[in-house]
Image (spheres, helix red, strand yellow):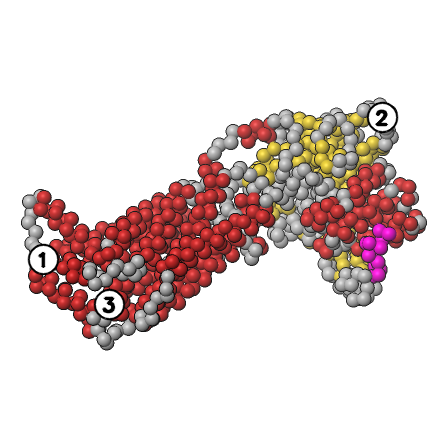
């Protein structure tokens, strides 16, 4: 009867655990099918985006084309084809750009490796794409030598200097901070009215300025840190030059200048507009002038407008810079790549009353960012920085940003953006159920391991309990802390920032809402997950010593040694990671976003092009991968040499059922964390396959604690006997009598146990792979002979 009762208990426990696991798996499969059906019925591609060909992007109801293409769908080539002239060969050249020749300067020249000639691709007055003449450069002339020559040379030689400066700056990606500083000084001298440079030299110098604005932002930052005076001089000279153009504008891809002669001595209002184009480059026709305007009158194509109110003067001038790279601020830090146009207005009259009204419609990623606040500013040439004196905001009724200033100079708006983070929904109920079952199973397993350690007398308790403890803490942190509390914060002041009349310069162009709690949770999740993996590796190493190298004892102070590794090494990794990230980003208010994500409280995953330098790779992926490889190797060795190999020294192991061998394999696989290899399968570049592996990963790893409880607690005879006793007491309380264990059965079990005890190494095999029962009588007889090991 007793054996039947135990059998009934096993069936009951197995049935309950099987039902729970089946429910979780069923929910996962059902959700996967629903996701796949939803994905197939709803097209993922945006029809409007698919209209843009050749790398064009859909923005504000139109295609923004790369420089090599134009047209409504970016299907019309905007290039000059390959060409050869005067022995020089050129590849395709974008309109408005100078293309380099394939022939390079020799190794022994100052410009070694640079192109020997350039050629301009432009549009004629009839709208045709034409190639200009070949310009051959001097391979023994560089920007530093030009900087020295321009100060002393005559006006006649400035034409050559201007051409050489344009030639040496055509490859903007190769320019250094010293190159940009020297080029700015050279063209500043050419624009200087006292140097009497020809109009041709100045127009070529405008091309040089446009080419400089294609250089990387960080190069300008380095140049400004060394010598910001060169930029200030160039800006001032450009403003003066804009008054001397007559009625012929000068338009280059990154800069445009316009003079407007004033025909009346009475107060005049001049409206200068910049239109949106099919690309980020300025082209002929991008700017328009209206001398009879009464106020700002933007339309859907307007990107920038400035209305100049002047009391007197003969000429007014305008300069548009495609970006703000010449205006390197010490107080306003930029991190986004949104280009902000800068507009300059001026007149040739002194001591006059002037004012300007400006509107901006800046380009930025509307999908991922929203404007948090902005300030109307001008460039203070004395401070060499942005200033708000004399400028204030004006409210509008549309999507434009309006400013008013009571003087003329270079104007802009400084915007701060708030990223539209896509905070995920609360934890999926599959994850909640799986984690709840795992937490319950881990708690019961830890209690069981500690309470029965003296009875079981195995040497794996400390390692196993440490593994379960770290996994338990990680699950608790995951359930209660993975969600960023910022996702539920309602910032009522966000809209007020846009409507506020306070004209205060923001500190940076991105707004970040700090959440130290989320950072702490990320660090704890990082630590305890590394601890969990470390203990799986230690568990694998210990099983290898005990099962494969059974004749060799464990090293001295083994428990202390593995404890330092299991709990200490992950702490060192986490502390070093946070310390290095903080030291590299301490000047950034949101340095923590280099360590964690904002969407969830977990490690930040860098973009693909920055993955190699990502701390996520070195502080998590790499150590976890090494541990998993180690565990898989040990797992294979144990399967081959222990589980699936019959031991002839012990007859009771000759006929082990295949089911028991499979269960032993699963038991070790769960402790070794083998199922975590599903995380690598989630990287497959197939949406459906990735979705399936996502759910499989979720199912197997959120229920890992439950699996441990079933395989290492429920299956042990000690647990089953104790549970049987509980059932017996419950049965007795209801009046049902239970039969006592059979004496014959008890004696056979004791005899079998004593026989196994005669083979210590084999006994340890069975203790580790399938926890066995020690009856009450046997325990009492052996308790005086051995001390329980840790």
Lower sequence index among marks 3 and 1: 1
Above-or-below relation of 121 to 225: below
Above-or-below relation of 624 to 268: below
Determine crowd level at label 1: few under 14, some 14-19, many 20+ residues with C-alpha closer than 10 A.
Answer: few
Above-or-below relation of 201 to 401: below
Q: Residue at x 64, y 45 (%)?
A: 337
Lower sequence index among marks 2 and 3: 2
Lower sequence index among marks 2 and 1: 2
Q: Residue at x 76, y 52 (%)?
A: 178
Q: Taking the image as drawn, is residue 548 in sight?
A: no
Q: Residue at x 68, y 35 (%)?
A: 413
Q: For residue 774, what is the image quadrant?
A: bottom left
Above-or-below relation of 325 to 171: above
Farthest front residue?
784
Spot occupied by residue 250 in the image (x, y as percentages of width and height): 80, 43
Spot occupied by residue 520 in the image (x, y as percentages of width and height): 47, 43
Farthest top residue?
266
- Residue at which label 3 appears: 763
Q: Secondary structure at mark 3?
A: helix
Q: Secondary structure at mark 1?
A: loop
- Residue at which label 2 appears: 351
Q: Nearer the viewer, residue 692 or 133?
A: 692
Q: Are marks 3 and 1 in contact (CB under 8 Å)?
A: no
Disc number for residue 303: none
The C terminus sits in image quarter: bottom left
Q: Secondary structure at mark 2?
A: loop
Spot occupied by residue 546 in the image (x, y as percentages of width and height): 32, 67
Spot occupied by residue 768 in the image (x, y as percentages of width and height): 28, 63
Magenta-drawn segment: 135-148
- Residue at which label 1 appears: 741
Q: Are marks 2 and 3 in contact (CB under 8 Å)?
A: no
């Amino acid at each position: 009867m007793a054996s039947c009762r135990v059998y009934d208990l096993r069936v009951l426990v197995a049935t309950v655990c099987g039902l729970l696991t089946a429910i979780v798996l069923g929910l996962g499969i059902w959700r996967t099918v629903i996701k796949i059906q939803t994905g197939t019925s709803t097209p993922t591609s945006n029809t409007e985006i698919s209209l843009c060909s050749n790398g064009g992007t859909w923005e504000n109801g139109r295609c923004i084309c790369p420089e090599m293409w134009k047209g409504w769908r970016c299907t019309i080539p905007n290039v000059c084809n390959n060409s050869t002239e005067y022995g020089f060969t050129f590849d395709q050249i974008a309109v408005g750009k100078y293309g380099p020749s394939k022939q390079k300067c020799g190794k022994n020249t100052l410009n070694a490796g640079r192109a020997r000639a350039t050629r301009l691709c432009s549009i004629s007055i009839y709208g045709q794409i034409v190639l200009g003449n070949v310009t051959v450069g001097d391979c023994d002339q560089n920007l530093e030598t030009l900087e020295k020559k321009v100060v002393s040379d005559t006006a006649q030689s400035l034409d050559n200097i201007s051409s050489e400066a344009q030639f040496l700056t055509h490859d903007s990606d190769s320019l250094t901070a010293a190159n940009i500083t020297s080029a700015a000084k050279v063209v500043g001298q050419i624009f200087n009215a006292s140097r009497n440079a020809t109009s041709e030299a100045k127009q070529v110098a405008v091309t040089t300025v446009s080419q400089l604005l294609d250089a990387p932002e960080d190069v300008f930052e380095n140049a400004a840190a060394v010598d910001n005076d060169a930029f200030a001089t160039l800006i001032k000279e450009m403003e003066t030059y804009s008054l001397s153009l007559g009625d012929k504008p000068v338009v280059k891809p990154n800069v445009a200048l316009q003079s407007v002669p004033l025909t009346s001595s009475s107060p005049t209002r001049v409206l200068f507009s910049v239109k949106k184009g099919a690309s980020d480059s300025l082209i002929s026709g991008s700017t328009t002038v209206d001398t009879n305007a009464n106020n700002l009158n933007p339309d859907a194509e307007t990107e920038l407008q400035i209305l100049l109110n002047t009391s007197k003067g003969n000429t007014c001038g305008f300069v548009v810079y495609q970006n703000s790279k010449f205006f390197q601020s010490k107080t306003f830090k930029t991190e986004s790549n949104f280009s902000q146009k800068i507009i300059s207005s001026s007149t040739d009259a002194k001591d006059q009353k002037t004012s300007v009204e400006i509107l901006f419609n800046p380009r930025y990623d509307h999908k991922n960012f929203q404007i948090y606040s902005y300030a109307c500013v001008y460039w203070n040439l004395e401070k060499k920085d942005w200033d708000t004196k004399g400028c204030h905001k004006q409210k509008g009724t549309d999507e434009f940003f309006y400013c008013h200033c009571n003087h003329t100079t270079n104007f802009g708006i400084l915007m701060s953006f708030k990223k539209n983070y896509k905070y995920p929904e609360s934890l999926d109920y599959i994850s909640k159920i799986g984690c709840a079952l795992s937490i319950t199973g881990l708690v019961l397993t830890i209690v069981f391991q500690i309470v029965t350690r003296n009875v079981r007398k195995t040497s794996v308790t400390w390692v196993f309990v440490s593994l379960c403890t770290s996994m338990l803490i990680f699950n608790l942190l995951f359930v209660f802390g993975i969600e960023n509390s910022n996702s539920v914060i309602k910032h009522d002041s966000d809209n007020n920032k846009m409507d506020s009349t306070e004209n205060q310069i923001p500190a940076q162009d991105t707004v970040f809402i700090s959440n130290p709690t989320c950072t702490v949770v990320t660090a704890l999740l990082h630590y305890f997950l590394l601890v969990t993996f470390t203990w799986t590796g230690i568990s694998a190493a210990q099983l290898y010593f005990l099962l494969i190298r059974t004749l060799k004892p464990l090293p001295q102070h083994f428990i202390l040694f593995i404890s330092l590794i299991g709990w200490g090494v992950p702490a060192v990794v986490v502390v070093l990671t946070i310390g290095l990230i903080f030291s590299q980003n301490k000047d950034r208010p949101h340095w923590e976003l280099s360590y964690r994500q904002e969407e969830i409280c977990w490690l930040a995953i860098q973009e693909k092009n920055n993955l190699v330098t990502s701390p996520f790779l070195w502080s998590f992926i790499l150590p976890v991968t090494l541990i998993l490889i180690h565990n898989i190797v040990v797992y294979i060795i144990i399967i081959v040499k222990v589980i699936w190999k019959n031991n002839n020294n012990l007859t009771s192991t000759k006929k082990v059922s295949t089911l028991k061998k499979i269960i032993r394999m699963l038991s070790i696989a769960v402790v070794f964390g083998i199922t975590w290899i599903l995380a690598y399968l989630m990287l497959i570049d197939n949406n459906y396959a990735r979705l399936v592996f996502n759910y499989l990963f979720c199912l197997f790893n959120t229920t890992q604690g439950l699996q441990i409880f079933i395989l290492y607690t429920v299956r042990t005879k000690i647990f089953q006997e104790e549970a049987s006793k509980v059932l017996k007491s419950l049965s007795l309380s209801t009046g049902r009598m239970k039969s006592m264990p059979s004496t014959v059965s008890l004696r056979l079990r004791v005899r079998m146990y004593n026989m196994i005890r005669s083979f210590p190494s084999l006994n340890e095999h069975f203790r580790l792979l399938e926890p066995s029962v020690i009856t009450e009588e046997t325990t009492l007889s052996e308790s005086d002979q051995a001390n329980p090991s840790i």
